[in-house]
Image: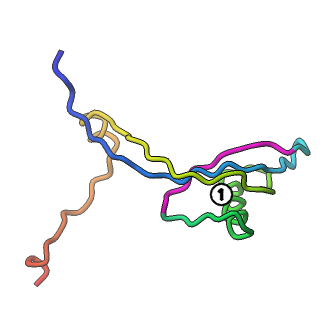
Amino acid sequence: MARQRMVTRTIVTREVAFKKFNMETAKVESDMIAFGVNVTINNDTKGIATINERLASMGQKATCVMIDSITDKETLYGMTEDEFIQNARVLPPRTTETEEE
């Protein structure tokens, strides 16, 4: 069988492990959320607020109470060209500086 051509991307994510208070069970649980590396997360009140915003957008009834760790992780993603064509969004053509003039 011939080797299938793949579309691949290496993406760096910032994984944040934290403790959250689950309001439905009234228990403290460990959890993890991945952000893009462009999102600044520090172990401070702003970092906790960012996590709480993400939890709310996910519909979770929980509040982050403590950040355990913040790590950057590099992951290689890929799919066949056929999968890519079926799932990708078509973008407008790129323009060059000479075309814009």
Q: What colour scheme has been applied to the protein in the rendered image?
A: rainbow
**Outermost right residue:** 26
Count of marks placed on residues: 1
Q: Position of residue 53 (x, y in %)?
A: 68, 62
- Residue depicted at 65% across the width and 65% down the height: 42
Above or below for 8 versus 65: above
**Quadrant where the C terminus is found in the figure:** bottom left
| Left or right, residue 14 beside residue 46 | left
Element at badge 1? helix
- Residue depicted at 71% across the width and 57% down the height: 56
**Outermost left residue:** 98
Magenta-colored span: 28-37
Based on the picture, tell me whether residue 36 belongs to the magenta stretch: yes
**Outermost bottom residue:** 101
Residue 50 image-quadrant placement: bottom right
Residue 7 image-quadrant placement: top left
Q: Main secondary structure of the magenta part?
A: strand
Based on the picture, tell me whether residue 35 belongs to the magenta stretch: yes
**Quadrant where the N terminus is found in the figure:** top left
Q: Position of residue 67 (x, y in %)?
A: 72, 55
Q: Position of residue 61 (x, y in %)?
A: 79, 51
- Residue depicted at 16% across the width and 70% down the height: 95
Q: Which residue is identified by label 1?
A: 54
| Left or right, residue 65 beside residue 88 | right
Q: Amino acid at mark 1?
A: Arg
Above or below for 39 versus 35: below
Front position in the image: 17 or 93: 17
Q: Label 1 neighbourhood size at 10 Å, few (<14), some (14-19), many (20+)?
A: some
Q: Position of residue 97 (x, y in %)?
A: 13, 78
